[in-house]
Image (cartoon, rainbow, N blue to C red):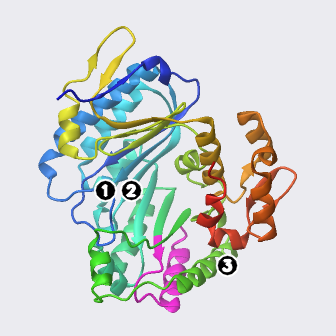
């Protein structure tokens, strides 16, 4: 059966800069709550997978030309789980195919017990300058419920090791709304995190996803069901604690010290362009959104035979789906993503981009949400209110055209 998606490379040419996301799907163990595109016990594919990443990067280098790259993000999976030599090979390929200022943000996600001093010295030396560490909690009982492979002491020691090595930009991820998580436990985790003095903290409310071991344990009554009201209380406590310690909230789930916002994630929230490479990676370039084949093995095989069919058409086997976005799609996505930012939507930029004011398109919706005290308006911006940040999904639904 013939497979692959046919594209005209000219449709992807653009003069705007891009962020690059590299998906590393390998994990030593899979957390009980995780439904991401990640895999265990396929380490024998790492070398071939890396070669396939290089092939994909080379293909996009030819299609996009010497595009300017504003950020690089290694996500997963657990990028820190694979050998540093593979990370270097991937970075070298990006530098060869694109214009990359050596001062840009280059992030690598890590599990705390992957932080080995010599390995991370090497990562720093090859250009990784930002670490995002999945701490999730400083409560060991909760870490066991989540199926994490580290404990709280390990997380603390790993953070200190990263600082000793010389990493100047460290983010930690925390989770709230967990089964059996008390307000006191959450406050202790926040206090411990703040005392470590990271540059950035991301807070994620637990989403109990279908098909995960955690979902099964909750459904069978082994674990209690998370309490949404308690989770909202935890979020509000975090807001107050972080603001009091000079953290600036710039997005619904993200706080940073001054000038340490995550450059890469802001590309998503500002609905700008990014290229995702690797199994299951998603991209947004011009008016196209597309995603790659999810299975690492199938992805590897798909990079063997990509063809130039004519002077204008290529057949790309590693892309699984490609959608052309309408103007309505772009407007809705700009609203839903941009409203996540604390500053909200810039009214002038919106009009310049779409040729109409927000009020011309969403006048009734804005009136309704203003009356419900879910959004705030100024002369320059529209943004979520404090109440609206707790009910973000309900607000975003109003802006779907």
- Of the pair 238 and 331, the residue shown nearer to us: 331
Was residue 187 drawn as part of the magenta stretch in this picture? Answer: yes
Q: CA distance from mark 1 to mark 3?
A: 32 Å
Indicate whether residue 232 is drawn in magenta. Answer: no
Residue nearer the viewer, 4 or 163:
4
Q: Is residue 356 left or right of residue 233?
A: right
Q: Residues within 10 Å of mark 3 (few under 14, many from 20)?
A: few
Tell me which numbered mark, 2 or 3, is placed earlier along the sequence: 2
Q: Which residues are magenta?
A: 174-198
Q: Left or right: where does residue 124 sit relative to residue 265?
A: left
Does 341 sit above or below residue 159? Answer: above
Q: Residue at x 53, y 89 (%)?
A: 183
The mark found on residue 109 in the picture is 2
Q: Residues within 10 Å of mark 1 (few under 14, many from 20)?
A: many
Residue pictured at 34% horizontal, 84% vertical: 140
Q: Which residue is mark 1?
A: 77
* Mark 2 Cα shell of 10 Å, populated few (<14), some (14-19), many (≥20): many
Q: Secondary structure at mark 2?
A: strand
Badge 1 element: loop
What label does residue 389 carry, if any? none
Say which quadrant the N terminus sits in. Answer: top left
- From mark 2 to mark 1, how far is it between C-alphas? 9 Å
Question: Which label is found at residue 240?
Answer: 3
Image coords of residue 142 (percent x, y): 36, 83
Residue at 77% of width from left, 71% of height from top?
Answer: 372
Distance of label 2 from label 3 (alpha carbons): 27 Å
| x and y percentages locating residue 28 in the rendered image | 21, 62
* 39 and 133: which is toward the camera: 39
Q: x, y (%) of residue 184?
A: 51, 91
In the drawing, does residue 247 fall left or right of residue 82? right
């Amino acid at each position: 059966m013939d497979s692959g998606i046919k594209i005209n490379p000219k449709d992807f040419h653009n003069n705007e800069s891009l962020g690059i996301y590299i998906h590393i799907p390998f994990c030593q163990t899979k957390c009980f709550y995780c439904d991401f595109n990640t895999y265990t016990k396929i380490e024998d594919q790492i070398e071939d997978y890396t070669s396939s990443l290089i092939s994909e990067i080379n293909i996009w280098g030819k299609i996009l030309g010497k595009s300017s790259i504003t950020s690089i993000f290694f996500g997963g999976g657990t990028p820190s789980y694979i050998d540093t030599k593979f990370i270097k090979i991937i970075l070298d390929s990006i530098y060869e195919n694109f214009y990359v200022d050596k001062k840009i943000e280059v992030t690598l996600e890590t599990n705390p017990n992957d932080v080995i001093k010599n390995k991370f010295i090497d990562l720093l030396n090859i250009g990784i300058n930002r670490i995002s560490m999945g701490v999730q909690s400083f409560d060991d009982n909760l870490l066991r419920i989540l199926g994490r492979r580290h404990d709280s002491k390990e997380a603390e020691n790993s953070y200190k090791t990263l600082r000793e090595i010389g990493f100047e930009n460290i983010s930690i991820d925390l989770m709230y709304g967990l089964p059996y998580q008390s307000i006191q436990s959450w406050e202790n985790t926040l206090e411990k995190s703040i005392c470590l003095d990271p540059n950035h903290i991301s807070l994620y409310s637990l989403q109990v996803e279908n098909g995960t071991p955690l979902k099964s344990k909750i459904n069978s009554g082994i674990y209690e069901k998370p309490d949404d009201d308690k989770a909202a209380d935890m979020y509000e406590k975090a807001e107050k604690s972080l603001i009091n310690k000079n953290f600036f909230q710039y997005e619904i789930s993200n706080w940073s010290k001054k000038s340490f916002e995550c450059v890469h994630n802001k590309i998503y929230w500002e609905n700008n362009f990014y290229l995702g490479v690797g199994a299951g990676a998603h991209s947004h370039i011009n008016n196209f959104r597309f995603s790659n084949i999810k299975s690492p093995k199938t992805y590897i095989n798909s990079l063997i035979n990509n063809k130039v069919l004519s002077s204008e058409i290529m057949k790309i086997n590693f892309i699984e789906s490609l959608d052309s976005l309408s103007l309505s799609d772009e407007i809705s996505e700009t609203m839903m993503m941009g409203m996540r930012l604390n500053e909200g939507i810039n009214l002038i930029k919106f009009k310049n981009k779409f040729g109409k004011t927000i009020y011309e398109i969403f006048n009734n919706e804005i009136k309704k949400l203003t009356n419900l005290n879910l959004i705030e308006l100024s002369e320059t911006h529209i943004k979520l209110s404090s109440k609206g940040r707790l009910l973000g999904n309900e607000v975003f639904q109003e802006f779907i055209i």
